Each structure stands twice: as structure tokens, then as C-alpha cells.
Image (spheres, helix red, strand yellow):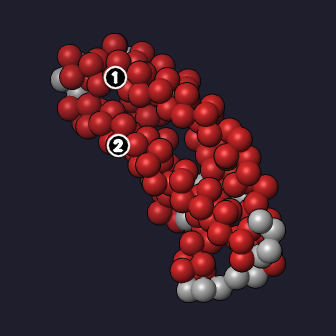
């Protein structure tokens, strides 16, 4: 599995967030500087998510249909890596959220309402990852281990 194996909706969401943040860095002023601070912590984190955190989710539709095959075992290395790296990923989320607070303050102060909404949208995305996506990826691995007799 690779970036191409990300669920399409998540790949699109990441691409949109990436493009919007790049545009924000070009604003100049406090908002642009705050956006650059977000990008410094956000973009490396997204690469990790796309490497091992999210690809297991692409199996969910097949698993929901009851499809299990030996080739699915390839995601186990990613789900195990996510379990091992979860504390780091959550710590990075704290750093991202702090940077987003600065971005929100700057965008609000400089009356960039669209970028203030972007900061809020990214904060919700971080919460979605922590409460739904990361746990779901780990559950995919645990389920596959049971179904493939690797528990």
C-alpha cells in the first residue's frame, strides 16, 4: 500500500488542506507567519499519516462486506507501527493544535475570516484523526490478525 492506497476522501481532504495552508503562508503579516509555523509541524506529520496511519482504512469497505484475503496482511506492519508511534503522533497533534491557535488568533486579528475558518477546520480534522481514524486503523489491524489467525 502507498499514498495511492489512501481512501479517496481522506486523500482529497489532505490535498485541500495542504493547498489552503500553502496559500496562507503567502499572505505575509502575522497570518502568513503563523501559517508557516503550522506548516512546519503539520506537513511532516501528514507524511507519516499517509505512510502508515491512514492506508489501512482503505480496507474498510472490503472488510465491511466480509471480504478477507491473505494480501490484506500487508497492512499489519502499518497498524503495528501506528500503535507504536501513537504517543508521538498524539504529541505532534498537540504541537499542531498550539500552532493552529496562533494561526487562528493572527487570522482573526488581521480579519482573514477564511483562514480563521481554516484553522478551525484543521483543529476538527486533528480531533477526527484522534477519535476516529487512528483507532479505526488500529482496529483494522487487530481484526485482520484475528481473521487471518495471527493473533
Mark number displayed over residue 124: 2
Distance (Cα) linking label 2 and label 1: 12 Å
Q: As drawn, is 112 to the left or to the right of 39?
A: left
| Pointer 2 or 1: first along the chain | 1
- Front residue of this view, candidates 137 and 11: 137
Q: Quadrant of residue 100?
A: top left
Tag 2 secondary structure: helix
**Relative to 62, residue 131 above or below:** above
Mark number displayed over residue 101: 1
Q: At 57% from the left edge and 72% from the top edge, which residue is drawn?
A: 60
Mark number displayed over residue 53: none
Q: Quadrant of the C terminus?
A: bottom right
- Is residue 96 among what the camera can see? yes
Q: At 56% from the left edge and 86% from the top edge, which residue is drawn?
A: 65
Q: As drawn, is 47 to the left or to the right of 30?
A: right
- Is residue 103 among what the camera can see? no
**Relative to 46, residue 147 above or below:** below
Rendering coords of residue 150 (x, y %): 81, 68
Q: At 79% from the left edge and 55% from the top edge, which residue is drawn?
A: 77
Rendering coords of residue 89 (x, y %): 59, 36
Q: Quadrant of residue 32?
A: top left
Q: At 48% from the left edge and 19% from the top edge, which residue is drawn?
A: 37
Q: Around disc 2, counting alpha carbons within 10 Å, would you say few (fewer than 14), some (14 to 19), or many (20 or more)?
A: few
Amino acid at each position: 500500500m502507498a499514498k495511492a492506497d489512501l481512501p479517496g476522501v481522506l486523500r482529497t481532504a489532505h490535498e485541500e488542506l495542504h493547498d489552503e495552508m500553502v496559500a496562507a503562508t503567502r499572505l505575509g503579516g502575522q497570518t502568513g507567519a503563523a501559517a508557516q509555523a503550522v506548516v512546519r509541524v503539520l506537513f511532516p506529520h501528514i507524511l507519516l499519516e499517509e505512510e502508515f496511519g491512514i492506508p489501512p482504512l482503505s480496507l474498510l469497505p472490503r472488510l465491511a462486506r466480509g471480504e478477507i484475503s491473505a494480501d490484506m496482511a500487508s497492512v499489519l506492519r502499518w497498524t503495528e507501527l501506528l500503535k507504536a508511534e501513537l504517543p508521538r503522533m498524539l504529541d505532534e497533534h498537540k504541537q499542531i493544535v498550539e500552532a493552529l491557535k496562533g494561526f487562528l488568533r493572527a487570522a482573526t486579528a488581521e480579519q482573514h475570516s477564511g483562514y480563521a475558518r481554516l484553522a478551525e477546520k484543521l483543529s476538527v480534522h486533528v480531533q477526527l484523526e484522534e477519535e476516529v481514524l487512528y483507532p479505526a486503523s488500529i482496529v483494522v489491524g487487530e481484526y485482520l490478525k484475528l481473521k487471518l489467525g495471527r493473533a
